Image (tube, rainbow, N blue to C red):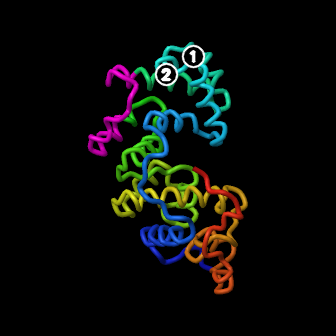
Amino acid sequence: MPTTYTASAAEKTRQNYEELQEFYPPLTLEKPRRSPMRELISTVLSHRTTHADEELAYDRMLEAFGDWAGVEAAPTAELAHAIRTTRWPDTQAPRIQEILRRIKAERGEFALDFPAEWPTEKAMQWLHDMPGIGLKTASLVLLFNFHKPVLPVDTHVHRIAQRVGMIPPKASADKAHQLLLAQLPADVLVLLNFHKHNYWHGQKVCFYSKPDCARCPLKGFCNYYLEHYGPATPEALAATPARWDLAWGELAH
């Protein structure tokens, strides 16, 4: 039995985009969901943390210290206590304060609007130089807030790309940023939909443990499905839902 398909990684990436574009609601370029400062700090808080706990930590932080100046000046132990619903509050608290200090020192205020005027590479490097800011966080801020042509690769996008065969099985998340971005057009709307649709797919179908392959529209070219179930039969493909049904659960922010 074959264990891979003959389609190239780039072809699989294109198929993934087209299938999930039909399966999930397509997104449009709208007003950013959050301010750049909130997106940056919330994404730091979100590492290995549920969205509900991230939101609770963010709200408690500003309730306790009022504004960014208050957060930056707060005793670090008190800030860590305020964000205790995150995975690593004792690590994240000093990182957040250092990020705020650098922004204030370099820009003169707690504001993050300047990347809009910068070339993508310069903005990416500036954010990536911040403590605790990796490619994923920098890419999220630049894509969502400034509509820069970058691609955030979170755990869901990374897992699906490996399972389907869009990237090598052992490619790191940082390498996946480079590989996937090279396989997609430098179109912000395409990159936004690719990211969000795979993010939803990882949450709702392609779970880390026991993925729901029967519901998955990618089974016709997915290496994981082929290895575990064999080539997708016409019956299996015909039984795959054509659209996401909200009765199965709401899609995340």
Residues at marks 1 and 2, CA–CA distance in whole angstroms: 8 Å
Q: Give how far across and how far down residue 230 sits, in percent.
A: 66, 78
Q: On the rendered structure, is 54 left or right of 36?
A: right
Contact between labelled residues 2 and 1, with CB atoms less than 8 Å apart: yes
Which residue corresponds to mark 1?
Answer: 76
Residue 63 within the segment the image draws in magenta: no
Residue 146 picture location, percent across and down: 37, 45
Our reading of the magenta stretch's main secondary structure is helix
Query: Pointer 2: residues within 10 angstroms few (<14), some, or many (20+)?
Result: many
Name the quadrant containing residue 49: top right
- 97 or 64, which is in the foreground? 64
Look at the image and give the residue range highlighted in magenta.
102-126
Looking at the rendered structure, the secondary structure element under dot 2 is helix
Which badge, 1 or 2, is on the more N-terminal residue?
A: 1
- Indicate the amino acid at tag 2: Gln
Q: Amino acid at mark 1?
A: Thr
Q: What is the x, y in percent for residue 141?
A: 43, 42
* Residue at point 48%, 38% (across, down): 39
